[in-house]
Amino acid sequence: MKKVGIIMGSDSDLPVVEKAASTLRELGVPFEAHVFSAHRTPEEARAFALNAADKGFGAIIAAAGKAAHLAGALAANTVLPVIGIPIKSSTLDGLDALLSTVQMPSGIPVATVAIDGAQNAALLAAQIIAVEDKALQEKLIALRKAAKEKVLEKDKAISERLK
């Protein structure tokens, strides 16, 4: 099975990123997590992206706040799918990171999830890897079924309560 790279621009992004790691762990998807900054460690970020495919990665998740150039910097150096997680900061509540992540120039795509949307980033990475992994597809289907059942249980409880 291909691995997922989780790259965060700062260790302050860890509380959000832990949700991605937890989701990948739950699905049995191997991953590595690193702190590489697009601005403070550009050589290391570039080297990771350049070598990711050869090292068995199938997708990269990039979490960054504020200017949030990390996902784009990684995507510029790999053809692997890159999924950006804009991180909410105290300055502009994550809108700056969202716009920096989603507004990529033509030819260098970055998939972008919601602000602090680490779980969806992990699920999207797993879905990308599952294209060629039937067992992972089955785990994702089971996860969706469990989520559906949870909602239907809540529907039943609310319907009963409000009769």
Image: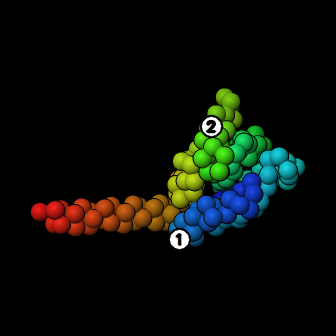
**Does residue 57 appear in the picture of this structure?**
no
Q: Nearer the viewer, residue 111 or 2?
A: 111
Assign a secondary structure to mark 1.
helix
> Disc 2 versus disc 1: distance between alpha carbons?
30 Å
User: Could you tell me which residue is drawn at 70 percent across and 45 percent down?
Assistant: 66
Q: In which quadrant is the N terminus drawn?
A: bottom right
Q: Position of residue 129 (x, y in %)?
A: 58, 56
Which residue is denoted by mark 1 in the rendering?
26
- Answer above or below: position of 34 versus 37: below
Q: Residues within 10 Å of mark 2 (few under 14, many from 20)?
A: some
Q: Earlier in the sequence, mark 2 or mark 1?
A: 1
Q: Position of residue 118 (x, y in %)?
A: 57, 57
Q: Is residue 31 left or right of residue 38?
A: left
Q: Nearer the viewer, residue 58 or 133?
A: 58
Residue type pointed to by label 2:
Leu
Assign a secondary structure to mark 2.
helix
Give the colour scheme shown. rainbow
Which residue is denoted by mark 2 in the rendering?
99
